[in-house]
Amino acid sequence: MTRRFLFVLGSSRAEGNTELLARRAAEQLPADVEQQWLSLAEHPLPDFVDLRRDSDHVQPPTGSTPALFLDATLAATDIVIASPVYWYSVSGLTKRYLDYWSGWLRTPGIDFKATLAGRTLWGVAALADAEPSVADPLVGTLNNSAAYMGMRFGGVLLGNGSRRGDVLDDTEALARAKTFFAQDAPLARFPHQAG
Ligand SMILES: Cc1cc2nc3c(=O)[nH]c(=O)nc-3n(C[C@H](O)[C@H](O)[C@H](O)COP(=O)(O)O)c2cc1C
């Protein structure tokens, strides 16, 4: 299967540090790798509503924007969550996209979990703090989500910056971006399963 990367941009501002860093990493992808970029700010998903009933059968989330993201997600071999660090975790826009995964898990006919199993989740995130470990909740959210889905996890490429463009001064992050997507992405495990 040709590799197809879906970049889900979760910043509430355009061309922010997260996107700049993700684009630097994506520049290194081989030419035959397809790329699709979707901004959650440009294509706002409606509030997610948990429509589960006792039977666990739900109405599929309807509307053209959820369908856009669902189709793109199903078509991707690699999903890159490019979210700034907001309150130590993913942005609200990103969280809402992940909440939609719960609806898609129970949508008849698409086999969402089986389709994504074995595919790869990656993260790219900018944060203002100079200490990368404060982003551990974001890393944990993505790692555990990948583990739950039976996906591979390539880790999170972190970059430092506050004002738009700051990340281009983070030379260490730019160096990591050069090889980020070439890294091995093992099957994700929950922390209690690791080791
Ligand atoms: C709502 C909000 C919450 C934020 N929370 C954090 C945080 O918890 N830790 C941190 O280091 N930076 C935090 N920041 C700073 C952003 O992570 C930083 O400005 C980053 O460069 C934004 O990425 P972007 O340019 O891709 O939008 C926050 C910014 C906003 C707007």
Image (cartoon, rainbow, N blue to C red):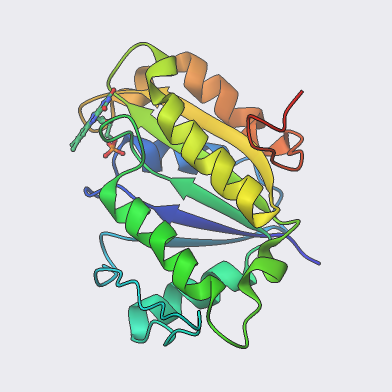
Where residue 143 appears, as percent x and y from the top left, is 58, 39
Where residue 88 appears, as percent x and y from the top left, is 32, 29
Q: Within the displayed image, which quadrant is ligand 1 positioned in?
A: top left
Q: Residue at x 62, y 51 (%)?
A: 148
Q: Residue at x 69, y 57 (%)?
A: 33
Q: Residue at x 49, y 55 (%)?
A: 7
Where residue 157 appears, as percent x and y from the top left, is 52, 30
Foreground: 66 or 179? Answer: 66
> Is residue 21 depicted above or below 72 in this figure?
above
> Is residue 119 depicted above or below 27 in this figure?
below
Q: Quadrant of the C terminus?
A: top right
Q: Is residue 28 left or right of residue 8?
A: right
Q: Residue at x 41, y 34 (%)?
A: 125
> Is residue 17 depicted above or below 102 in this figure?
above
Q: Quadrant of the N terminus?
A: bottom right
Q: Is residue 18 left or right of residue 86?
A: right
